[in-house]
Each structure stands twice: as structure tokens, then as C-alpha cells.
Image: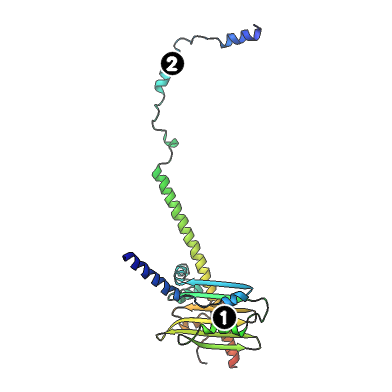
Amino acid sequence: MDRLEQELKAALGRKDPPAGFAERVLREAARAPARGTALPQRNRPWPRWLAAAAAVVLCAGAGLGYRQYRGEVARQQVMQAFRIASVKVNHIQTHVREVER
Amino acid sequence: MKTWRTLTLALGLAAALSAQQFKFNLDHLAAKASDTVDLSLNGATLQFAAKFLDSKDPDESKVKKLIAGLDGIYIRTFEFKRAGEWTEADLEVIRKQLRSPEWSRIVGVKSSQDGETDEIYMRNENKKITGLAILAAEPKEITVVHIAGPVDLDSLAELGGHLGIPKVEIGKQK
């Protein structure tokens, strides 16, 4: 057995705990919170109803936004349609006037 | 049985509604055109758009009043690469779809110098105006406009002066 082995054996050898160790462990265990008890307020996850409400608000907002977008597209198309119709009517009216001269 | 009756009624209603829409067959022009613009706005779309038109804006306010009773606006523009790609026969196919007694031509102008043909048709049912059609043909472009619904001529004339276009007077004697 060389020197290294002797040192390892000395370091890893069984040792008795110091006096009062068991009492201290039991005392600390009694002070720790029991499993399943409430977490501090700031660590609590969102309640389900709040998450559901947030999802509803998000969906409603997205729906309103999409409706606004569709409305804007429809508005532009209507204005474009009347613009084309007006241009044609004016063009025809100009021709009519030219013929009448 | 009741379900079938409801379904039949719904189909009948849908057929009646679709009959009011753009029903000119312009496939013969689409086949020849290099570019086609199709702007189709049915009654529901017009009424939806009306909610988004600004009543304080003079142009949009005017348009809002005009579309109030309309069933739809349908515009098709066909562009051709070269002059002469469409013929008089192509226009005749459209004219045949604008037949009396429902349709009557109120304006017709043909310019051989410019090679342009412009016509306006009114649709009458039970002595009421229920539609307007514009046929505007240029050497490289043909536009067909169909406004479905009760179009008031005075309101149409009032389009002029708005949308940046000079005022026009249609059907009014000088």
C-alpha cells in the first residue's frame, strides 16, 4: 500500500458524526415548510381564469384588428370603383360635348 | 322535411341574389386581353365599407350616400397589347347582354378619329331605375362598369366635382 492509498483511506474512512448532529437535523426539518403549502405571492403562477381571460382579450383584439383591416380594404376598393366609374362618365360626357359642338 | 324546405328556400334566395350581381359574360374579352382588372363589390361589401367611410370627408361622404341603396358595383377592365386586338363583334356580344326592355341605351358616342366607343345603359324595372352599365372602349382598353341597384342620375352627376374629377352633367339639356 503506497502513500496515496493510505491518505485516501484516512480521508474516506467512516467517522462518527459530532455530538448533537441528529438533533440539529431533526430540528431544521421541523422548521422547513411542508410539501404542498402555498408559495410566496410573487412565485405563484397565474390563475387559470386570468390566463383564459387574457386569451379571450387577445382573440377579441385580433378579431377587431382584422375587421378594421377588412373595412379599410373595402373602403379603398369602393373609392377606387367610384373613381373609375367617374373617370369613365366624365370621359363620355366630354365626348358628348365635343359631338354637340 | 322542414330542413329541406329551409334549404330550398335558402338556395332560392341565394339564386335570386346572385341574379342581381354582375352577369355579363365577358370571357371572350378575357381570352384576348393581356391584362385584366376585376373589381367586384357586392351589396354586403358595400354596406360593410360604408361603415368605414368618413362622413366628415366630403368625397367619402358623397360616396357613402351613393352606395346606401346599391346592390353592387362591378368593374372589369381589359387591356390589350396592340390596337385592333378587339373587334366590333366583341362589343356586340356585350350589347346583346344589354337588351331591351330591361336595358336601354341613354348615351352612345363613337369616335372614328380616336377609335373610341362609349355607351351608357340604364336598367329599368317597373318604371324604376335598377342599374347602370358603362361600356367604354379604346383601341387598347375596354372597360365595363355595372352598378346594380337604384342609381339616381342626379346623384351620379354629382360624382363630378368630387374625387378630383370635374363636374359632369348627364341627361340634362343645355
Q: Name the kind of residue labelled 1 in the image.
A: Lys
Residue B163 position by quadrant: bottom right
Give the residue at mark 2. A24
**If you read the primary sequence from the N terminus, does the residue marked by circle 1 or circle 2 appear first?**
2
Q: Which of A21 and B21 is in front in this view?
A: B21
Q: Do labels 1 and 2 share a chain?
A: yes
Q: Name the kind of residue labelled 2 in the image.
A: Arg
Taking the view exactly as shown, the residue that stands out farthest to the front is B1
Q: Which of the colour schemes (rainbow, by chain, secondary structure, one colour) is used?
A: rainbow
- Direction from residue B58 to residue B138 in the image, left or right: right
Q: Nearer the viewer, residue A22 or B37?
A: B37
Give the residue at mark 1. A88
- Determine the residue positioned at 46% across, 55% down: A61
- Determine the residue positioned at 47% across, 67% down: B52
- Determine the residue positioned at 64% across, 85% down: B115
Please indicate, yes or no, whether residue B166 appears anywhere in the rendered image. no
Task: Tell me how far mark 1 sits from mark 2, CA to CA.
Answer: 97 Å
How far across and how far down the image is residue B108, in percent? Answer: 55, 88
How far across and how far down the image is residue B162, in percent? Answer: 53, 77
Query: Mark 2 falls on what kind of element?
Result: helix
Q: Quick one: label 2, few (<14), some, or many (20+) residues within 10 Å?
A: few
Marker disc for residue A50 = none
Pointers 1 and 2 in contact (C-beta within 8 Å): no
Q: Which chain carries label 1?
A: A
Q: Which of B18 and A50 is in front in this view?
A: B18
Q: Mark 2 lies on which chain?
A: A
Query: Mark 1 falls on what kind of element?
Result: helix
Residue A7 position by quadrant: top right
